[in-house]
Image: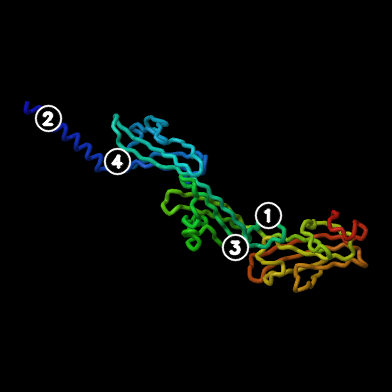
Amino acid sequence: MRNRLAAVSVFLTLIFLAGSAYAQLGFAENLTLSVTPQYAAPGETVRVSAESLLLDLEAGNLTWYVNGVQRASGPGLLQIDVTAGSNGSETQVRVVFMQEGIEVASSEVFIRPTELDLIWESDSYTPPFFHGRALPSAGTNLHMEVRPRFKRADGSFVSPRDIIFTWRRNGYVIASASGRGKSQATISSPPLFGTDVISVEARTLDGLLSGETSVRIPSTEPILALYENHPIFGILYHRALGAQSTLPEVETSFAAVPYFAEASAPNDVGLIWEWHVDGNAITNDPAQPNEITINAEGSTGLARIELELLHATNLFLSASGSWGITLLPGAGTPGNPFGATQ
C-alpha cells in the first residue's frame, strides 16, 4: 500500500513539473500572429498567420476564432483569411494551439482598419487655369499632405494633431518631416530621370490606430508649349500651337510656356530663353523673354520658330521646341481668337 502511494506521489509530481516546465519555457508567449497587409483598409482581405520559434505548430491542432466565434480548426492550420470591417470597427482574431487535447498556447490580434489619402503636387510652373497637377522636374520641390481618417469606436475621428507621422523616401526616414501632427511635408523632387517612392506611416499616440500609404513619383522633363498672344484677349491658353499652324494675321505675337520648369513665372530671372527664327537668333524683350513678335509683311509668311530653354543655376533644366508658322491674311477670320488654326 505504501509503495502505491509513493508511485502516485511521483506521478503527480511529474505532472506538476511538466506543467511548470511549460510555464517556464513561456510557450504561450512564443505563439505570435502576423497580419498581411500590415495596415488594413475597410473591406480588405487580411491574412492572419500563426508563427512560433519554439512550438512545432504542424504537430498540433489550431483553432481560430473571429470575434469569439469559431471560424476554422484543424491540424497545421497556420493561416486564416479575414475581411476587415468598416472604418472605426474592430475585429478580434484569436488562435488556440492544442496538443493531445491540452491547450499549449494561444494568441490574438486586433484588426482596426483606417483610411489615408496622400495628395501631392510640385512647385514647378504651370500657367493660369491649368487643371492638371504640377509635375516635378529636377530642381523643384514636392508639397505633400496626408489626410487620415482614423475613426474611433465611438464614431469620433482622431485629429491629425494627435497622430504621429513618419515620412519615408525609398524606405529611408525623412526625420525633418516626421513627428507628431506633421501631416504636411515639403521635400525635394526626384533627380533627373529618377523615381522616388514616398510613403507615410500614421499612428495614434496610444498605438491603437495606424495606417500607411505610398506613392511612386517619377521625375518629369519640362515641356515648352507655344501660344498666340492676342492683342485683346491675351495669351490663348486654350489653344496651343501644333508643329504646323496657320494664322490669319500679318503680324502675330507668341508666348512660350515652360510647363513643369523650376520657375515662379515665365519671366523668372533664372530662366534663359534662346529664340531662333529661320535659323537667326532673336533678341527678345528682357522684361518678357518668353515672348516674340513676327511680322510677315513683304515675305512669304512662312517662319520656323525654334526655342531652347536653360537655367542659370539648375544645369539639369533643359527643354526645346520648334514650330512651323504660316502667317497668311485671309486664311481665317482675323481677330477671332476662338477660330480653329489650320
Picture quadrant of residue 52 = top left
Q: Quadrant of residue 55?
A: top left
Quarter that holds the C terminus:
bottom right
Crowd around label 3: few <14 · some 14–19 · many ≥20 (10 Å)? some
**What is the secondary structure assignment of the residue under circle 4?**
helix
Q: Which residue matches tag 3?
A: 141
Percent from the top left, x then y, of residue 194? 59, 57
Front position among marks 3 and 1:
1
Tell me the residue that label 2 is attached to.
7
Q: Between disc 3 and disc 2, whose residue precedes?
A: 2
Distance between mark 3 and mark 1 Cα atoms: 17 Å
Which quadrant, please, contains the N terminus?
top left
Residue 172 shows in the view: no
Mark 3 or 4, nearer chain start: 4
Residue type at mark 4 is Phe
Q: Position of residue 243 (x, y in %)?
A: 80, 56
